[in-house]
Amino acid sequence: MADLAGYTPVRREALCNPYRAYLVCVPPPPSSGVALLQLLAMLEKPISPRADRKTRRHGSCSPRRAG
């Protein structure tokens, strides 16, 4: 109870970034909201054709044959 009695909340500004038609706002650090904004930004980046060829060349999408 003494711990709660001495608690003082800290008000911080939200971090906001656009994602498609939305404005996504998250709590600032030390929360993990920044990670969500980074993940959404990665989803918006187009995959380059060169990266796609590399994936197909190594066969990571198809099962290997035994033998």
Image (cartoon, rainbow, N blue to C red):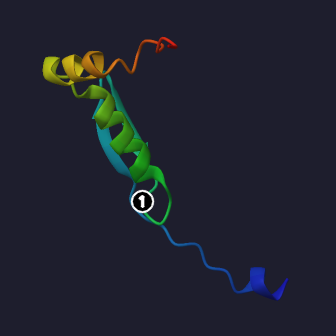
Q: Residue furthest right?
A: 1
Query: What is the count of numbered marks?
Result: 1
Q: Is 4 located above or below residue 45 in the figure?
A: below
Q: Residue at x 14, y 22 (%)?
A: 50
Closer to us: 17 or 60: 60
Q: Residue at x 33, y 28 (%)?
A: 43
Q: Which quadrant would the N terminus be assigned to in this image?
A: bottom right
Q: Position of residue 21 (x, y in %)?
A: 31, 21
Is residue 22 or residue 8 the one in the foreground? 22
- Residue 23 location, quadrant: top left
Residue 56 image position (x, y, % from top left): 28, 15
Viewer-nearest residue: 56 or 18: 56
Q: Position of residue 66 (x, y in %)?
A: 52, 13
Q: Secondary structure at mark 1?
A: loop
- What residue would you read off at disc 1? 28
- Describe residue 66's horizontal placement relative to residue 55 as left or right: right
Left or right, 38 with respect to 27, comes to left
With 14 as the anchor, is 19 left or right in this view?
left
Residue type at tag 1 = Pro
Query: Compared with residue 7, is residue 19 higher up or lower down, i.e. above or below?
Result: above
Residue 43 to residue 30: above or below:
above
Query: x%, y% of residue 55?
Result: 29, 21
User: Dot 1, how many residues are within 10 Å of its Cα: few (below 14), some (14-19), or many (20+)?
Assistant: some
From the viewer's side, name the closer residue of 13 and 17.
Answer: 17
**Which residue is outermost to the front?**
67
Q: Quadrant of residue 62?
A: top left
Q: Is residue 25 above or below residue 34?
A: above
Residue 54 appears left or right of 39? left
